[in-house]
Amino acid sequence: MFDTHELGRRPGALQRLTRSVEAPVDLGIEGVIGVPEGAPVEIELRLESVMEGVLVTGTARASAEGECVRCLEPLRQEVVADFQEMFSYPDADDRGRSKKAASDNDTVDDEDEDMTPLEDGMFDLEPVLRDAVVLALPMQPVCREDCAGLCSECGTSLNDDPDHHHDAVDIRWAALQGLAGSLGTDEKDNMGGAEAGVDEKQEK
């Protein structure tokens, strides 16, 4: 939670904050990449008091961990996420007027109900931070841009063995190659029998 009491409610007032917070659970894309729970997240915030509330603009930096989608090796990647969110005063509408006064003149807009209100001058940044980090993370992380991945036939890492390959065999010829091999064996056997017969005749 962050406190805005020091900022005050005078429109135009500014406050800058730098914080290091612990990453909440599941900060990232499940099963792909994310910031480990409890890891440090460095946050820089700019708080600006406006008529309707406090405009929060910030940047979060953290180290995300995951697995390369090509070679399946573990990876670590720095993530920088920018965000901006309006936190409204609970007693003011989107034009900075008292909601009670506004209700005397017109109906409160539906948009007012969707605004995130400050709670006793405090705001919770976790939902905003979570959305910003998820959007900043890659959907298909790679250990490096030129990662060659794995061999589709045997799973060998092509990064470690870039010359790795398998001789392609046309399945239409595989049976004939086997047949040719068996014929070659039979011919050798026949040749061996013929030579033995000739030797016997010569002995006689």
Image: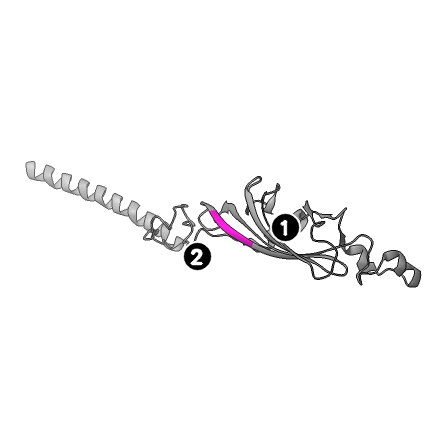
**Residue type of the residue flagged with mark 2:** Glu
Tell which of 158 and 29 is nearer to you: 29
Question: Could you say where residue 33 lies in the image, as x and y percent from the top left?
Answer: 54, 47
Screen quadrant of the N terminus: top right
Q: Is residue 139 visible from the viewing direction of this image?
A: no
* Quarter placement of the C terminus: top left
Tell whether position 145 is magenta.
no
Q: Position of residue 91 (x, y in %)?
A: 83, 53
Badges 2 and 1: C-beta atoms under 8 Å apart? Answer: no
Callout 1 secondary element = helix
Q: Which residues are magenta?
A: 76-80
Q: What's the CA distance linking mark 2 and mark 1?
A: 27 Å
Q: Is residue 157 left or right of residue 181?
A: right
> Dot 2: within a 10 Å radius of its alpha carbon, few (fewer than 14), some, or many (20 or more) residues?
few
User: Quick check: 158 left or right of 140?
Assistant: left
Point out residue 72 in the picture as x, y percentages from the top left corner.
46, 46
Which residue is identified by label 1? 129
Dividing the picture into quadrants, the one containing residue 49 is bottom right
Q: Colour scheme of this structure image?
A: one colour
- Where disc 2 sits, the SS reads loop
**Secondary structure character of the magenta stretch overall:** strand
**Which amino acid type corresponds to the residue marked 1 in the rendered image?**
Leu
> Image point 23% across, 46% down: which residue?
187
Q: Is residue 10 left or right of residue 179?
A: right
Q: Is residue 3 above or below residue 111?
A: above
| Crowdedness near tag 1: few (<14), some (14–19) or many (≥20) residues, C-alpha within 10 Å | many
Q: Residue at x 69, y 47 (%)?
A: 3
Q: Mark 2 highlights which residue?
A: 145
Q: Nearer the viewer, mark 2 or mark 1?
A: 1
Question: Which residue occupies the foreground of this view, 10 or 68?
Answer: 10
Q: Position of residue 190 (x, y in %)?
A: 22, 43
Depth order, front residue of 103/177: 103
